[in-house]
Image (tube, rainbow, N blue to C red):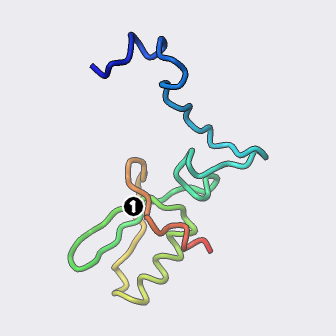
Amino acid sequence: MNGRPGRPSEWPDAEKPAAEPSGEHALGERDESATGSPRPDEPDVHLSVHLHGLRFDFAICHTAASRFIAEWRTRHHPGAAEILPGDPCGLERLPTERLYLL
């Protein structure tokens, strides 16, 4: 028990968790926190990256994936990164995704 009285609906306002962000800015622009994508209007793809015999899979927006693959293939072998078919739902996003959109 955590010492709070009764159900969460009975907690004092100061103890209630903050409301989840809606993903909307004051001007109505979408925020990436709602979808996870820096470009929520663009489809996500499944990016597979091979490095030193290990495979890493990420969700990433299409534009960033194309730029990542072009750069990755110049530094590694041509098959070191590819877009795989299928839904990327459930995959972690590429941590550096936003850098490939600059």
Secondary structure under badge 1? strand
- Crowding at mark 1 (Cα within 10 Å: few <14, some 14-19, many 20+): many
- Is 31 above or below relative to 6? below
The residue drawn where x is 54% and y is 61% is 61
- Is 21 above or below relative to 66? above
Across and down, in percent, residue 56 comes to: 31, 66
In this view, the residue in front, 39 or 33, is 33
In this view, the residue in front, 77 or 75, is 75
The residue drawn where x is 42% and y is 53% is 88
In this view, the residue in front, 54 or 95, is 95
In this view, the residue in front, 45 or 12, is 12
- Quarter residue 55 falls in: bottom left
Q: Amino acid at mark 1?
A: Phe
- Is 2 above or below relative to 49? above
| Most distant residue in the left direction | 53
Q: Which residue is mark 1?
A: 58
How many labels, in total? 1
Across and down, in percent, residue 51 comes to: 28, 77
Across and down, in percent, residue 84 comes to: 39, 63
The residue drawn where x is 53% and y is 25% is 14
Query: In what quadrant of the picture does the N terminus appear?
Result: top left
In the displayed structure image, the side of residue 57 where residue 96 appears, left or right: right
| Most distant residue in the right direction | 27
Across and down, in percent, residue 6 comes to: 38, 10
- Quarter residue 101 falls in: bottom right
The residue drawn where x is 62% and y is 74% is 102
